[in-house]
């Protein structure tokens, strides 16, 4: 199960986060708490997370509910955006118009490198899960999508078939007859938590 982190201030502002260590906002913390209650019902065997705080803080409620430790794996980090990090999409479009079209940060991490490192992490994690077991992997939107593409062996011409993942949603991969396949994608997309005086209503 591949679980994207909860909402952050930069998500709201449409800023490229990359590997900048941005925390969850209040809504993101509420998303993580709510999603953790659902994911705990699946009785995971292990939790592995990117070491960036927005992923670790998303994993924390699930760890608390299940009693499982959270193993950190730097290979699950988001794609590095180089000088794009912290910029809004409008700013990227204005300053790097050609690179924006191909979505290639000029001093960032190449797409193929992200695919290889995240797929490598998924392969290692899959090898550690007991037969019939479940690992919850907490990572980032682009990292999950690109890692899944490589892990599943999608050809280059099919690389855009997977759309973006929403904050705190998850995708499920399963192994059957020796082949990994997508069982769910971008699941758990629920309304944003209501915050304020009636938040606990």
Image (tube, rainbow, N blue to C red):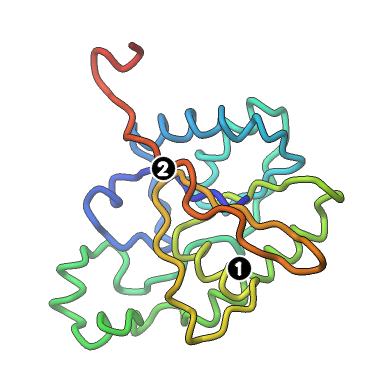
Badge 1, how many Cα within 10 Å: few under 14, some, many 20+? many
Q: Report if residue 139 is visible in the image.
A: yes
Residue at far right of view = 131
What percent of the width, then of the height, locates residue 94? Answer: 13, 77
**Residue depth check, mark 1 versus mark 2: number of the one nearer the observer:** 2
Badge 2, how many Cα within 10 Å: few under 14, some, many 20+? few
What percent of the width, then of the height, locates residue 108? Answer: 40, 78
| Residue 15 drawn above or below residue 5 | below
Residue carrying label 1: 118
Q: Secondary structure at mark 1?
A: helix
Q: Is residue 34 left or right of residue 123?
A: left
Which circle's residue, 1 or 2, is located before the other in the chain? 1
Q: Secondary structure at mark 2?
A: loop
Distance from Cα at disc 1 to Cα at disc 2: 23 Å
Residue carrying label 2: 189
Q: Is residue 91 left or right of residue 100?
A: left
**Point 68% across, 44% down: residue:** 47
| Residue 119 drawn above or below residue 45 | below
Which of the 4 image quarters holds residue 18? bottom left
Q: Is residue 38 left or right of residue 198?
A: right
What percent of the width, then of the height, locates residue 48? Answer: 66, 49
**Point 60% across, 35% down: residue:** 39
**Point 69% across, 28% down: residue:** 66
83 or 57: nearer the viewer = 57
Residue at far front of view = 177
Q: Residue 56: give its label.
A: none
**Quadrant in which the C terminus is drawn:** top left
73 or 35: nearer the viewer = 35
**Point 56% across, 75% down: residue:** 115
Q: Report if residue 51 is visible in the image.
A: no
């Amino acid at each position: 199960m591949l679980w994207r982190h909860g909402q952050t201030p930069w998500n709201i502002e449409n800023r490229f986060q990359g590997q900048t260590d941005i925390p969850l906002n209040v809504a993101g913390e509420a998303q993580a708490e709510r999603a953790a209650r659902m994911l705990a019902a699946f009785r995971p065997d292990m939790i592995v997370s990117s070491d960036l705080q927005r992923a670790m803080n998303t994993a924390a409620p699930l760890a608390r509910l299940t009693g499982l430790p959270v193993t950190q794996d730097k290979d699950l980090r988001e794609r590095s955006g180089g000088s794009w990090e912290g910029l809004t999409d409008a700013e990227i479009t204005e300053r790097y118009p050609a690179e924006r079209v191909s979505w290639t940060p000029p001093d960032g991490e190449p797409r193929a490198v992200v695919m290889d490192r995240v797929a490598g992490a998924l392969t290692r994690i899959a090898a550690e899960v007991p037969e019939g077991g479940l690992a919850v992997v907490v990572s980032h939107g682009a990292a999950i999508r690109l890692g899944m593409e490589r892990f599943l062996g999608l050809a280059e011409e099919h690389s855009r078939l997977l759309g973006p993942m929403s904050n705190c949603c998850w995708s499920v991969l399963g192994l059957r007859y020796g082949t990994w396949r997508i069982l769910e994608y971008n699941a758990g997309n629920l309304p944003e938590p209501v915050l304020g005086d009636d938040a606990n209503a």
